[in-house]
Amino acid sequence: MRKNPDMASAVAAIRTLLEFLKRDKGETILGLRENLTWATDCLTGVDSSVAVSSGGELFLRFISLTSLEHQDLSRCKKVMEERGELFLEKISMSRTKVAKLCHTFIKDGTKILTHSYSRVVLRVLEKAAAEKKRFSVYVTESQPDSAGRQMAEALRKLNVPVTVVLDAAVGYVLEKVDLVIIGAEGVVESGGIINKIGTYQMAVCSKAHNKPFYVVAESFKFVRLYPLNQQDVPDKFKYKADTLKTVQNLSEEHPMIDYTPPSLITLLFTDLGVLTPSAVSDELIKLYL
Amino acid sequence: MADGGVTDGPDKNDDVERAKCEGKEMTKEEKQRLRKEKKQQKKSKEKKDDAASQESEKGKKSDGKSSPASQPLPKPTTQKAPSAVPAPAPVPMPASEAPAPADKPAKSKAELKAERRARQEADRASKQGSKKGEVGPQASAGKPKAPPSELQPVVKRLPEHMQVDNPDVLKKLAKKLERQQIPLRLDYGYKVSLFSHLHQYSRKAPLTQQLSIPSTVIHPAIVRLGLQYSQGIVAGSNARSVALLHAFKQVISDYTTPPNEELSRDLVNKLKPYISFLNQCRPLSASMGNAIKYIKKEISNIPSQCKEEEAKRKLLNCIECYINEKIILAAKAIAKYSIEKISDGDVILVYGCSSLVNHILCEAFEKAIKFHVIVVDSRPRLEGREALRRLVQRGISCTYVLISAVSYILPEVSKVFLGAHALLANGYVMSRVGTSQIALVAKAFNVPVLVCCETYKFCDRVQTDSFVSNELDDPDDLIVTRKGKTQLEDWQQVDSLGLLNLVYDVTPPDFVDLVITDLGMIPCTSVPVVLRVKNVDQ
């Protein structure tokens, strides 16, 4: 993962799971599934992002969604591996698909506000820049890890005029911007999103200013959670994995993510198409049921 | 239905009178004879009313009608309905009867009404100028097939229980009940004008008083059930459905197929008067409607070569499975999902008495989650007391308030759990009156609202307000005696006073954060998706 910073952690996780599948010496299909679930848990234990757990679960569902009625276990495994490769290929293409859908919403002279460092948003802005659109970007600094500065660097390389603003200056800057584009670490069943801390604030402010709030996310980030409010998000996603293991009293730690409810989101751009928040549940039912 | 449809002036013959007084069920021959007489009376009435230019049509119509008695009555007459909509065109399309009577679907009462209305208009038009009438039938005969297909979507159907202020519909209902030999329940008291299109019955005049003894038309289990419904002994959506299914099990096990009849068709016909009777006792709920649809489907799917004993066993088994899957197991699944949402230290607000919500809270308590419950109650039913009793019996700590205090206690509440009577296709939640009020206030305080509902309560209806379709309970329930004085005792004497006792209201999906069903947790807007998935399954 360190070697290829452009790859999403979930994609790396899925690649690992595929390797694991190839090397697995299990005898039964049930055993195979259990091993894969255990592997996913391990991965989530290392990097507690929502995308890893959702990607893992979707991978498992995708490969087992075919008819596994072959006599020979090895042939079954072959089928599953092929589907695994297919899945990996699809999700590698997903970012491009999203970019293709979203860049048309960026017109000449648009001022965009974004939050922290998101590879999908970067890809979208790359595509828009490649289409010779003229736009400028405001990026929030996004403490505690200052990921926003990384984003600003990447955008400067694209020759896009970019300004870094404080997290606290979101309300101040919103009157100047035309739209807000955000990535997501996870998309939940209600149509809301889980993303870096500070996203919820931005969503509330953009609602107050009546600015469109767009989310770009790949479909493997759809997860079977349904948080009712900020407290309802499970702890294992809120804090980094090492924090969970080392720290005694979690209430003193600062959460890394927050939950944005669907009422604040205008549209979601995914590789399944442009969806409204209520359509997310529809897609999830199709994926999972 | 096969023997439903047109109902006109009932001049019964003596046999039928006798049969009714004896309380015996009319035999099939008597019913057919009655039907034929009604047809003839209608014809003779129309012959008198209509102008001469329509004489030829009458002739064709009677030809069409005298075609074999097995051809169901509604089809020839209702074929007139589609062409009736454009005003000047006279009513019947006799030419279309012959070519495609079998293809036309059975039309609804609303279309019969439209036909009658158009006939009146045609009478008026013919009085104005007979020339129009002559041109009309030729034109309509010329294009019999084209109008029906394009006019069919224009006529909308309205269920009869929502048209109580329309005398035609009432007359039709009365005749239908007479044919099924079920007494008609009369409305009671002054109805508030906004709700005058709904029935309002009095609990002191149960339907069973008008039944003759012995009544062999209605099975005694159904009579008992009807009485239990109308007196409020069996109340609550799940309880009513389960009681209904148990009564139907009794009916099926006591049923014997008459000779020369097929079980699948005859049993369905036997059930129809029972359903009308229950509807008269208390309007059917959405869950009961879905259960009845399921049973009818199962019955009609019984193959004809199946022996009676085996068929009955299969049906009883189906009903058992339905109750088990859709109600009991669904409750367990919902409890499992709900328990994930209840955490230690929660203060949960519940309204009224929902069997499902009570079950969830008891299960959560078994899992040793520490929470506190606030039970909200409202007059006149005071169902919250029952819920309070059940929860306290289990040892759950509870608080009891009336609905007027809801905005006072909401700042202390962390979650609101509500039950539902039905979930409509546009995401609206239909539940006990007062639910939408609680959801509204909870939204204002940013407290999450969770609705728990089994999937068999999902219905295809769409409603955006509580006026269109509701239930009016006995207005006398609102009268209360305090300190020996009953203020509203003589409310009927006061002309301008009306008592309104609503039973249901609808909550829009914006106020509901989450719906917990046996399929999982879904947002309120995904109800049509679930309905679609279910239809695909079936």
Image (cartoon, rainbow, N blue to C red):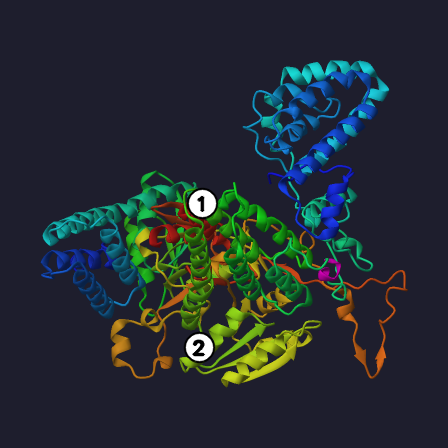
Q: Position of residue B337 (x, y in %)?
A: 41, 68
Q: Which residue is mark 2?
A: B364
Does residue A8 appear anywhere in the picture?
Answer: no
Q: Considering the numbered disc 2 on the image, is that residue within a helix, a strand or a loop?
A: helix
| Quadrant of residue A199 within the rendered picture | bottom left
Name the amino acid type tagged 2.
Ala
> Which mark's residue is nearer the viewer, 2 or 1?
1
Q: Which of the two residues, B48 or B28, is positioned nearer the viewer here?
A: B28
Give the residue displayed 57% in from the left and 29% down from the top. B104
Q: Is residue A138 left or right of residue A80?
A: right
Q: Which of the two residues, B468 or B303, is positioned nearer the viewer here?
A: B303
Q: Is residue B432 above or below residue B125?
A: below
Magenta-highlighted residues: B207-211
Residue B135 lies within the magenta run:
no
Q: The numbered mark 1 sits on a residue in which chain?
A: B
Q: Earlier in the sequence, mark 2 or mark 1?
A: 1
Name the amino acid type tagged 1.
Asn
Q: Position of residue A51 (x, y in %)?
A: 30, 60
Rounded to the nearest whole Å, what is the CA distance between mark 2 and mark 1? 41 Å
Does residue A11 appear anywhere in the picture?
Answer: yes
Q: Considering the numbered disc 1 on the image, is that residue within a helix, a strand or a loop?
A: loop
Q: Is residue B57 left or right of residue B273?
A: right
Give the residue displayed 76% in from the left and 45% down from the top. B17
| Quadrant of residue B321 within the rendered picture | bottom left
Q: Which residue is mark 1?
A: B301
Using the rendered image, report if marks 2 and 1 lie on a common chain. Answer: yes
Q: The numbered mark 2 sits on a residue in which chain?
A: B
Residue B209 lies within the magenta run:
yes
